[in-house]
Structures are given as structure tokens and as C-alpha cells.
Image (cartoon, rainbow, N blue to C red):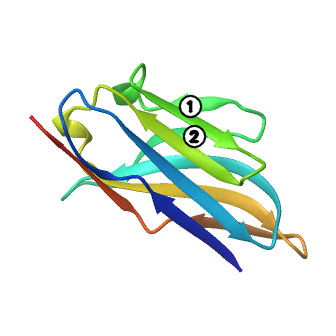
């Protein structure tokens, strides 16, 4: 069984920074793509950033130059460093992880979500 545990959300003023973490645990053989998505009230969940096992990254245009995704493969953890936060970044942030479990079973799951609130 795989667990994804997020941490690091909170409330900041515009221009501030936050760092999110998402740790995967369980019977993991190999982690593929790790990423972050967000969902604002009344909006659909949208991609923020992803990183493949090879280190390739993809960012939403709205966060390019402000957010940085990284991962520590030894810790099965993905991070999202968010700088120069804006009120429109306010949302619940979810990590998403694709991996292979023991027994060669694929898994794709979501973290529990962490609230990020940016005030003007």
C-alpha cells in the first residue's frame, strides 16, 4: 500500500514564499513522474508543475519563474518551492505521483491536499 503525505501549506502575504513537500511511502519499486496540482474554489484542478524520473520539468505558464519543483529520490519526496506568491495562487495544492509497486503493479495517486492562502 502506498501513502502520500503532504506538508508545508499555510497563509502568507503577497510576495512571500512557501515550500510544499510530499513524501511517498510503502512498497515502492520505482517512482516515475511526480507533480503538483492545485484547485481553487469553484475551479477545476489544474497542473502546476511536474518532474519526471529523469529530471525533466513542466510548469504552468502562470507559475514559471516563481515556482520550482524538485525531488529527492532517496527520500521518495517531491518539493514545490513557491516564491513571489500572488493572491491568485490561493488554492488547495495536491501532489500526484506515478510509480510501480512491488509485484510490478502501477499506481497513480494523490496526496491529501494542503491549503495555500495568499493575502494581498
Does the CB distance between marks 1 and 2 fall below 8 Å? yes
Residue 101, given in percent of the width and then of the height, sits at 81, 70
Nearer-the-camera pick, 89 or 117: 117
Mark 1 residue element: strand
- Quickly name the residue at label 1: 58
Q: Quadrant of residue 13?
A: top left
At 53% from the left edge and 66% from the top edge, which residue is drawn? 5
Q: CA distance from mark 1 to mark 2?
A: 5 Å
Q: Quadrant of residue 56?
A: top right
- Horizontal arrangement in the rendering, residue 34 relative to residue 60 (left or right): right
- Quickly name the residue at label 2: 50
Classify 74 as above or below 54.
Answer: below
Q: Residue furthest bottom?
A: 1
Mark 1 neighbour class, 10 Å CA radius: few under 14, some 14 to 19, many 20 or more: some
Mark 2 residue element: strand
- Horizontal arrangement in the rendering, residue 1 relative to residue 90 (left or right): right
Residue 93, given in percent of the width and then of the height, sits at 38, 53
Residue 17, given in percent of the width and then of the height, sits at 33, 33
Give residue 106's mark: none
Nearer-the-camera pick, 40 or 115: 115
Classify 60 as above or below 20.
Answer: above
- Horizontal arrangement in the rendering, residue 43 relative to residue 2 (left or right): left
Q: Earlier in the sequence, mark 1 or mark 2?
A: 2
Residue 84, given in percent of the width and then of the height, sits at 29, 25
- Horizontal arrangement in the rendering, residue 97 relative to residue 37 (left or right): right
At 18% from the left edge and 31% from the top edge, which residue is drawn? 14
Q: Quadrant of residue 57?
A: top right
Classify 31 as above or below 71.
Answer: below
Q: Residue furthest left?
A: 120
Mark 2 neighbour class, 10 Å CA radius: few under 14, some 14 to 19, many 20 or more: many
Q: Quadrant of the N terminus?
A: bottom right
At 90% from the left edge and 76% from the top edge, which residue is drawn? 103
Amino acid at each position: 500500500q502506498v501513502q502520500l503525505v503532504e506538508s508545508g501549506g499555510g497563509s502568507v502575504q503577497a510576495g512571500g514564499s512557501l515550500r510544499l513537500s510530499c513524501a511517498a511511502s510503502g512498497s515502492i519499486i520505482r517512482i516515475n513522474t511526480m507533480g503538483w496540482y492545485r484547485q481553487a474554489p469553484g475551479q477545476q484542478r489544474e497542473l502546476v508543475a511536474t518532474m519526471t524520473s529523469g529530471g525533466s520539468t513542466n510548469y504552468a505558464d502562470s507559475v514559471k519563474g516563481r515556482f520550482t519543483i524538485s525531488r529527492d529520490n532517496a527520500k521518495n519526496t517531491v518539493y514545490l518551492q513557491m516564491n513571489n506568491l500572488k493572491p491568485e495562487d490561493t488554492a488547495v495544492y495536491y501532489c500526484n505521483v506515478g510509480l510501480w509497486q512491488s509485484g510490478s503493479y502501477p499506481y497513480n495517486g494523490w496526496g491529501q491536499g494542503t491549503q495555500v492562502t495568499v493575502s494581498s
